[in-house]
Structure formats: C-alpha cells, structure tokens
C-alpha cells in the first residue's frame, strides 16, 4: 500500500461518522451527502485493505478492531494538524509572536525570566508560554508534536530528525552533591573514606533525597550513594532537583542536583548548603527550534539572543558559584 493511497479528508469523514454514530447523522454535521460519505469510506477501506465499520439494519455503525485503531489514529492526526495550522498562522500569517518554551524545572528563576524578557522586548510580542517536562526525551517529543516551538534539553536526546531543527549549544551541565551547611568538612571526609565510613556518621549523612524515576540521573545518583555513602537511605523522594535541595537547605538530608539549577537558587538556600562537584556526569545542553522559524526574523532573533544569554551570562554564572570539587575533601583526607 502506497503512502498516498488515502487522504486526510477521508480520515476526517471516517472520524465524523464514528463520532455521529451513523452515516445519516454525519451527513448533516459535515454537509456531505450520504452516497458521497459511503463512497469515501469504501475508498478508505479499499486503500487500507481492511473493513473499518460494521453497518447494521438501523443505520448505526460499530467499529471493527482495525476501525478502532484508525479512529484513534485519525483523532491524533486531527489534533496534530490543528496544532500545525495554528503554528503556521502564528509564524507566517500574523504579526503576533507567541513563544512556547519547553524546559526542565531546573531552568526556573533567572533563566526563565531572562528568556521571557527577551521575548517581551520584541515589538510583535503577544504571549510567552512555559511548558515543563522532567527529561530531555519528553521535551524533544513536545517539540516534534508542535506543542512547543523552542526547547532546551540534552543534545543526545535529539538523535532522530535532527535535520528538522535549528540547534545551538548552550552549556555543559554536571551533577552537584548538596549537603547541609551544618555538616563539617571533617564529617564529610570521614563519610567518604572507604576505610572509615562504616563508623558513626553524621546523622544527616544517613539520609538522601531520591529523584523522580523520569529524571535521567536517578539511577546514577542512587549508584553513587551505594558506592560512596552505603549507609545512607533514600528517606525522601522529590519530583525535581529544585524541590530536592529544599530538604537539604532545611537540614534533613543530602541530594544531587544539576549544576544548571544553582544560578536559580535563592540566597537563603545557598547560605544553608555546601555544594560539591561530582565528576563523571556531563551533559551538553542545547537550544532547539523547528528550522523553518529561521526564516522568521523575530524567532531567529530570539533564538540567537537566548544562545548569547547562555554563553555570556548564564553559563558563567554556573561556574561562578561556590561549588567545590569533591576531590578537595579526598585530597585533604590523603594529606591528613
């Protein structure tokens, strides 16, 4: 069966018949004669090589298994087409600019407001919409489905259809270990010493915050705790890095966060935690939008301004925070 053996219009007619419950009722709703509807349904079934609906004597219809599959497919295609048409109108037929940005919750605060301000400064600005998802794969799917027109995610998530998007590197993200400020460096050295960490630990080092399963660093984080703090238990669970560090700032446990969250933390949180760089967890973070937006000066300009902001301001802010290398504790331990 060829890819063009049936039309989107035929699927729309089929969907209308299913929703109406009969060809007669569908005829009134879509202003098409009953013979025309029957003809289009027959062509669709012939193209697909299956029967989609059963017609009974009363005129009502029921779906075959294939019909149920294609009804759900028609629903999905119709919704996607509506989204694509809306995006087309916003991009090429109106002067009103709408920026729909997909990010993870770590990029709240400073990053979020900076991008919103960049959008608002455009003369054609109409609306800024924020869409959160917990991992990069979900954000790429949002972009593919036209639910967002810009997204920030890990580069490895865009393995397919990369040619359909304009992509720019923003920064390299890493993992940071957050510890309550009340825990002394001596207690941390003792805890991280393989020869001694089975001894009495500081009580707060016996608890850590486990991140949501959808967050890609979760298994690596749990493995790190098994190797370095085997006596620590996942006493708390949180959906995001931003919520995880609240437990740490309040003196309840330790946790892992992404370095990209640090510039967005309040001074109150920063004053109540110690932060240590954990090696071996690097992810290249990119900004992506559909390539056709490059032909629209406003969207192309916003894209470049976000890239410039990350290179000139946000990336350096990630490095300027008081994040110590974890090896600093280990080095001092060996010297001692």
Image (tube, helix red, strand yellow):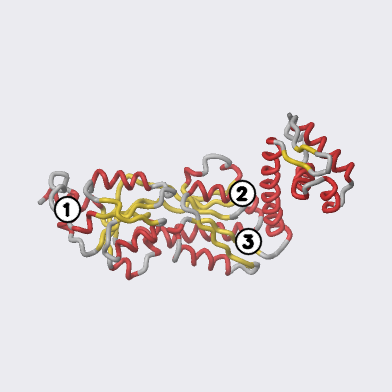
Left or right position of 309 against 179: right
Q: Which residue is mark 2?
A: 145
Q: Splitting the image into 4 quarters, where does residue 131 fall? A: bottom right
Q: Secondary structure at mark 2?
A: loop
Nearest the eye: 201 or 36: 36
Left or right position of 3 against 30: left
Give the mark, 3 or 2, whose residue is nearer the N terminus.
2
Front: mark 3 or 1: 1
Within 10 Å of disc 1 (Cα), the crowding (few <14, some 14-19, many 20+) is many
* 63 is higher (above) or lower (below) than 301: above
Nearest the eye: 18 or 312: 18
Q: For the residues labelled 3 and 1, say whether their Cβ atoms are less than 8 Å apart.
A: no
Q: Which residue is mark 1?
A: 189
Front: mark 3 or 2: 2
> Split into 4 quadrants, where in the image is the N terminus?
top right
Residue at 49%, 66% in the rendered image: 114
Residue at 37%, 65% in the rendered image: 265
Measure the C-alpha gap from mark 3 to mark 1.
Answer: 53 Å
Measure the C-alpha gap from mark 1 to mark 2.
Answer: 48 Å
Q: Which mark is residue 298?
A: 3
Q: Where's residue 232, x and y in %?
A: 24, 51
Measure the C-alpha gap from mark 3 to mark 2.
Answer: 22 Å
Q: Secondary structure at mark 1?
A: helix
Residue 316 in view (yes/no): no
Left or right position of 329 against 256: left
Residue at 44%, 60% in the rendered image: 312
């Amino acid at each position: 069966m060829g890819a063009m053996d049936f039309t989107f219009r035929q699927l729309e007619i089929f969907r209308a018949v299913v929703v109406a419950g009969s060809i007669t009722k569908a005829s009134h709703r879509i202003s098409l004669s009953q013979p025309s509807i029957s003809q289009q349904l027959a062509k669709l079934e012939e193209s697909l090589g299956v029967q989609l609906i059963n017609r009974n004597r009363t005129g009502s219809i029921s779906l075959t298994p294939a019909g149920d599959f294609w009804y759900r497919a028609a629903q999905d295609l119709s919704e996607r087409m509506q989204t694509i048409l809306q995006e087309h109108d916003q991009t090429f037929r109106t002067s009103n600019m709408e920026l729909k940005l997909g990010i993870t919750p770590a990029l709240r605060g400073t990053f979020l407001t900076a991008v919103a301000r960049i959008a608002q400064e455009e003369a054609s600005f109409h609306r800024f919409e924020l869409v959160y998802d917990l991992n990069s794969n979900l954000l790429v799917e949002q972009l593919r489905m036209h639910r967002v027109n810009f997204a920030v995610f890990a580069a490895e998530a865009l393995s397919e259809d990369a040619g359909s998007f304009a992509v720019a590197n923003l920064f390299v993200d890493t993992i940071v270990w957050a510890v309550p400020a009340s825990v002394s460096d001596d207690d941390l050295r003792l805890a991280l010493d393989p020869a001694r960490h089975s001894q009495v630990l500081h009580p707060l080092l016996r608890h850590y915050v486990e991140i949501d399963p959808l967050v890609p660093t979760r298994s690596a984080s749990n493995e790190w705790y098994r190797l370095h703090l085997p006596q620590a238990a996942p006493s708390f669970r949180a959906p995001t890095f931003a919520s995880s560090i609240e437990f740490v700032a309040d003196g309840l446990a330790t946790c892992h966060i992404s370095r990209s969250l640090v510039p967005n933390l309040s001074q109150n949180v920063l004053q109540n935690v110690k932060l240590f760089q954990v090696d071996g967890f690097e992810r290249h973070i990119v900004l992506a939008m559909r390539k056709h937006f490059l032909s629209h000066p406003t969207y192309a300009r916003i894209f470049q301004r976000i890239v410039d902001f990350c290179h000139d301001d946000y990336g350096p802010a990630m490095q300027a925070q008081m994040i110590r290398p974890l090896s600093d504790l280990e080095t001092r331990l060996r010297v001692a």
